[in-house]
């Protein structure tokens, strides 16, 4: 898996504090997905079963909480690259990109709240590229993907797709399938 250790939030060592930290992150992930990035910190604390002071002790600013939720999501996507690595190279890349687009589409409001100049954002972006890069390279080596595209090209393409508002998930999946077909190698004319 891509090394995200240097970005990992510091989870408290005390068992009760660690449980509270985890509960806040889980509640924030759920609340952001359901209500958007504007959800109140009080609502997140309530869902986590902690007081607002406990939330602020772990995450002194809204930005820190959002970054930590974003980190957890990125870590899941990077792990997903490892999970699909044993598939056929084309299938592995496609499965991982579908997971990535699903994540971006669901977390668009959260991503818009991030400081794109922060070390966390830049590090997570690098980790996503590092996770997808080997999948792309393997697919290219097997002749399953055009040799002239880079992981930056692919990530920009799927990020663009993920940022568009679609009528439903089926339409998004169809547009992604068309784009992924475009990555394929065109047979040589005979």
Image (spheres, helix red, strand yellow):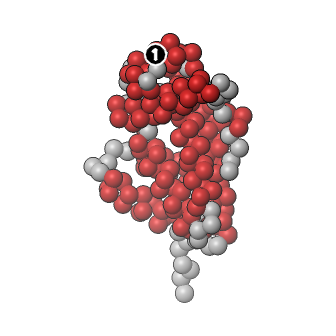
Is residue 47 in view from this perspective? yes
Q: Residue at left 46%, top 20%?
A: 50
Is residue 61 in view from this perspective? no
Q: Residue at left 67%, top 69%?
A: 141
Q: Is residue 85 above or below residue 143?
A: above
For residue 31, which quarter of the picture? top left
* Residue that sits furthest to the bottom in the current view: 190
Other-residue count near label 1 (Cα within 10 Å), few / some / many at <14 / 14–19 / ≥20: some
Q: Residue at left 68%, top 40%?
A: 4
Residue 126, given in percent of the width and then of the height, sits at: 65, 42
Q: Is residue 173 left or right of residue 95?
A: left
Query: Which residue occupies the foreground of this view, 54 or 7?
Result: 54
Residue 142, given in percent of the width and then of the height, sits at: 64, 73
Q: For the C terminus, give its image quadrant.
A: bottom right
Residue 33, given in percent of the width and then of the height, sits at: 39, 36
Give the residue pinned by disc 1: 51
* Residue that sits furthest to the front in the current view: 15
Q: Secondary structure at mark 1?
A: loop
Residue 38, given in percent of the width and then of the height, sits at: 38, 24
Q: Residue at left 47%, top 56%?
A: 98
């Amino acid at each position: 898996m891509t090394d995200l250790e240097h970005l990992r939030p510091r989870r408290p060592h005390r068992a009760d504090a660690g449980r509270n930290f985890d509960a806040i992150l889980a509640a924030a992930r759920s609340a952001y997905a359901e209500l958007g990035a504007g959800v109140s910190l009080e609502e997140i604390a309530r869902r986590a079963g902690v007081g607002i002071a406990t939330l602020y002790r772990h995450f002194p600013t809204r930005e820190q909480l959002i970054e930590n939720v974003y980190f957890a999501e990125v870590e899941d996507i990077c792990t997903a690259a490892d999970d699909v690595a044993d598939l056929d190279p084309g299938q592995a890349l496609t499965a991982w990109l579908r997971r990535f687009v699903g994540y971006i589409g669901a977390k668009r409001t959260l991503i818009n709240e991030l400081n794109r100049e922060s070390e966390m954002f830049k590090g997570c972006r690098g980790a996503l590229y590092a996770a997808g890069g080997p999948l792309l390279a393997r697919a290219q080596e097997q002749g399953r993907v055009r040799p002239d595209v880079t992981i930056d090209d692919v990530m920009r393409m799927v990020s663009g797709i993920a940022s568009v508002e679609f009528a439903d998930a089926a339409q998004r999946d169809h547009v992604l399938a068309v784009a992924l077909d475009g990555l394929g190698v065109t047979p040589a004319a005979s």
